[in-house]
Amino acid sequence: MTTDNTAARGAAPKNAPKDTPPTADRPVVELRGAGKSYGNIRALHGVDLAVHPGKVTCVLGDNGAGKSTLIKIISGLHQHTEGEFLVDGEPVRFTTPREALDRGIATVYQDLATVPLMPVWRNFFLGSEMTKGPWPFRRLDIARMKRTADEELRNMGIVLDDLEQPIGTLSGGQRQCVAIARAVYFGARVLILDEPTAALGVKQSGVVLKYIAAARDRGLGVIFITHNPHHAYMVGDHFSVLRLGTLELSAARDEVTLEELTNHMAGGAELAALKHELSQVRGVDVEELPDAEDLTASAAPAAAPSEGKS
Ligand SMILES: Nc1ncnc2c1ncn2[C@@H]1O[C@H](COP(=O)(O)OP(=O)(O)OP(=O)(O)O)[C@@H](O)[C@H]1O
Ligand SMILES: [Mg+2]
């Protein structure tokens, strides 16, 4: 299991409480009525969110809904200005991303912090290089880093022909996968992925989704930020839809269908209005879109399930 492996490598998060191992029913990360204001702009308000080990929590929402603000709070880039943020049940307030990382919270940003011209194995260990020999003769342990990177990528089912190739030559999807494997190796308990599939095609998105599932199966709690309800539904255990900074929907997988999720994302009523407008434009075939009545009907119970959060 992951925890055993990371302990063996001595890479377990430094401040993780040892007497309180995470259990499937206690969230590793939790927000209770959390919010964030930038001056007098309220970007996020009253958000409840729970991240469990071995589960994928999807955070969906349109542009400006507050998704990035939410993950910035959890990853230690920004502090919440209302509500509570708990890690292993203990209220926290991180002032730097390093503090979040020390508690096992790793974030993979869309514009990955990699050095494109450096080999894959070198990027895998960037900032945490393995060394050998006593000071002042300490030097990089290249052989061990290459071997370990190769093993770890294979463990996650990621097969690359050549770890010497510059990471910049990998596809966007492959780079995301390397970043996921890296976070797993360095002992992450919670993995935050900010729109990892946004710039990817169908096939590459599928590959990234596969590694999200692999990280989940290794016991990590995953926060998957996406615009795409189809991607979310393929791997998600829980769905939180943000709208204008508040939770519009918070539902477990068995409480919501893909269709309902899609309607929440599309904003059923708005789409109905758009359909009406489009119908006035020549050459746009609106027959393919669902009926306005269907959309408004399925959008109506929108607020209701948000109480039924686990
Ligand atoms: N540093 C900031 N200062 C002021 N307002 C901000 C700041 N960061 C975000 N906001 C505002 O907060 C709201 C939520 O932004 P956020 O970036 O969290 O949205 P998002 O859901 O990530 O959007 P996108 O899908 O476009 O990435 C927006 O109205 C945005 O303008
Ligand atoms: Mg964003």
Image: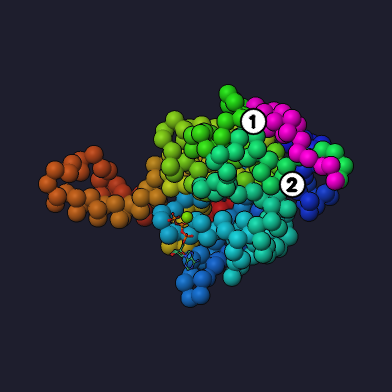
Kindly report the distance in space between the C-alpha atoms of the residues bearing marks 1 and 2: 25 Å
Quarter of the image with the N terminus is top right
| Mark before the other along the chain sequence, 1 or 2 | 2
State yes or no: residue 149 in magenta.
yes
Q: Which residue is drawn at 72% across and 45% down?
A: 128
Q: Is residue 303 left or right of residue 112?
A: left
> Where 138 falls versus 28 (above or below)?
above
Q: Is mark 2 on a helix, strand or loop?
A: loop
Residue 213 in the image: state x and y as whole percent: 58, 35
Q: Mark 2 points at which residue?
A: 22
Looking at this view, name the residue that lies furthest to the top: 161
Q: What element carries label 1?
A: helix
Q: Residue at x 54, y 67 (%)?
A: 36
Residue 154 in the image: state x and y as whole percent: 65, 27
Colour mapping: rainbow
Instruction: In this rendered view, identify the residue nearer to me: 274 or 257.
Output: 274
Q: In this view, does 144 lie to the left or right of 109?
A: right
| Magenta segment main secondary structure | helix
Closer mark to the observer between disc 1 and disc 2 = 1
Q: Which residue is drawn at 12% across and 46% down?
A: 282
Q: Name the residue under label 1.
A: 153
Query: Does the beta carbon at disc 1 come under 8 Å from ligand 2?
Result: no
Looking at this view, name the residue that lies furthest to the bottom: 40
Residue 200 in the image: state x and y as whole percent: 43, 38
Question: At label 2, which amino acid type do we have?
Answer: Pro
Looking at this view, name the residue that lies furthest to the right: 134
State yes or no: residue 138 in magenta.
yes
Magenta stretch in the rendered image: 136-154
Q: In this view, does 33 lie to the left or right of 103?
A: left
How busy is the neighbourhood of tag 1: few (under 14 within 10 Å), some, or many (20 plus)?
many
